Image: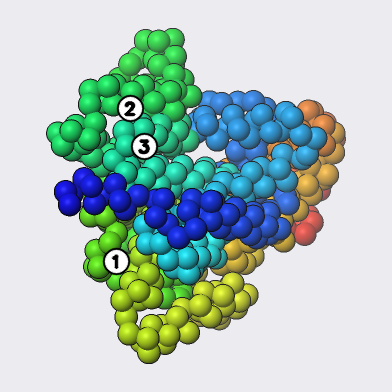
Amino acid sequence: MSRSARIDSASAVDVPGGTGRVWAGWLAIFAGACALYGLTASRAIGWQDSGQFVVRVMRGELADPYGLALTHPLHFWICRLCVLALPVDPARLLPIISAIFGALAVANVFGIVKFLTRVNLAAIIAAVSLAFAHTFWHMSTLAKGIDPLAAALWTAEFWALVRWDQSRKAKWLIIVFFFNGLGLACLNMALLSLPVIGIILIIALRNGQGCWRTVFLSAIAWLIGSSLFTGYVAAVAWNSGDIAGTIHSALFGNYANAVAGRGFPIRYTLTSIAFTILSFPNLILPAAALGVMRGRSIGVPKLSRIALVWMLGIHLLFVLRYGVIDQYTFLLPAYAMIAIFAGIGLAVVKERWQVGRRNAVLAVAIPAMLLTPVLYFFVPALARHFDVLGAQARHRPYRDDYRYLFVPWGLGEDSARRMSHQAVELAGRDGVIISEDPMGTFAIRYQLERMHRPGVKIVATADAGLVTRAAAGGRPVVLVPATTENSPAPPPRGTWQRRGDLYLLRE
């Protein structure tokens, strides 16, 4: 039997129960992940990027002040249309949309592992472990669900690649490029897998498993998928006349130094490693290593394995040298790749290991997976006891940094809402709010719009002239400190009177 005939015979129709059973499992996993993320999603306006994104969607502002790379038009327009169509507070609605994106990625991992291995138990453990992974869970319950959507689109892209590898039907390659284009319209990190699928397209062309028509249609599919982003970039370049500057902004935004940095920023990389271990405190990481090494033994197609290794390697290389404080949040697609390899590794255990060893591993793997959420109830207290954050704790108003960082579900974390609501209440109808932390300013702007206070002014620093004029005119002056750890500097006139974690100027 020829190589191509063997590939055709290994197509997904040979999955036990056929594709119908795969999709039934997919729907069950999707529904379960939707319930998990939806029930634990944030119900309030958030800090930093989440707060900013809610404000942008409320106002219909596609442009991001930090550059074209941060516009994320596919995600923006999905959320914008939902906000316009549904009578729901955007701060509550957007986390639910993120939950759906995250659930899509989890369900796709189930489908990929099932198609690759035909082992139902391995696919379930891989998908559920990803659903319970700390950072994946956390990002799937916040308003800014760009990373869960990017993971959902990448998994769809790779699933289509697996289908092509099993069938060598050109339509699947075209679908691969369409999903990669959609990924770019969401987050430009989709470009990281483009060289891999580009090489695969060349291989297909060389081996007669595609033709120039396939190349043409793949390019068209990619352009259609990416059009929300590439079209917007082209429009900005046309209107500004600055083609080079526009391309630079589309690739890097205002973070060119972080993107182009060399080496690995030790503190950020160690943080990413720590959160990866926290996300998979079970057998997923060793199972993934086994999947990389032994996937061939259960018939996982060579090209799929190599493509996944390269995609994972490129993604990790990019993210771990990306010098931003929340570096670890960009690992969500990598977590999906790790979960797929873990599913392959568990399939090796189930199909190739002796009964005694197999049962011993599964007897540990399944309880460890199920107990992962329980661990998250104790992590904040343990981290606090050992002073894990140390000098890195931010001490923002009303926020418990240990709960904020180490509990994956957004439900119950409402410090930004409490801070912003109190600030607007204290400011009255025409007051001045001094917001020392720019990452909290978005939540305040959100409250001003929701509470209809157009007369309130927000400033970043306690400008002596402004404070003096406001106080002389009887306008309330509110200080939102960057940290509650230190007392604020004396005002130019009067004194600061503490109100909870905020301050009100008194004459």
When the figure is inspected, residue 391 is found, relative to residue 150, above or below; the finding is: below
Q: Amino acid at mark 1?
A: Ile
Label 2 or label 3, whichever comes before in sequence order: 3
State the image coordinates of residue 447 (x, y, percent, origin top left).
75, 40
Label 1 or label 2, whichever comes before in sequence order: 2
12 horizontally vs 140: left or right: left
Q: From mark 2 to mark 3, how far is it between C-alphas?
A: 10 Å
Q: From mark 1 to mark 2, how far is it between C-alphas?
A: 31 Å
- Circle 3 Cα neighbour tier, 10 Å, few/some/many (<14 / 14–19 / ≥20): many
As rendered, which of 16 and 234 lies closer to the eye?
16
Residue where numbered disc 3 is placed: 172
Tag shown at residue 298: 1
Disc 2 + disc 3, Cβ < 8 Å: no
Q: Residue at x 37, y 27 (%)?
A: 222
State the image coordinates of residue 128 (x, y, percent, origin top left).
53, 65
State the image coordinates of residue 410 (x, y, percent, origin top left).
65, 58
- Circle 1 Cα neighbour tier, 10 Å, few/some/many (<14 / 14–19 / ≥20): some
State the image coordinates of residue 390 (x, y, percent, origin top left).
49, 70
Please identify, in this view, whether the residue under mark 2 or under mark 3 is nearer the observer. Answer: 3
Q: Residue at x 79, y 56 (%)?
A: 499
As rendered, which of 491 and 403 lies closer to the eye?
403
As rendered, which of 71 and 442 lies closer to the eye?
71
Q: Amino acid at mark 2?
A: Ser
Residue where numbered disc 2 is placed: 218
Q: Amino acid at mark 3?
A: Trp
Query: Is there any visible trace of residue 491 in the rendered image?
Result: no
Q: Quadrant of residue 431?
A: top right
401 horizontally vs 150: left or right: right
Element at badge 2?
helix
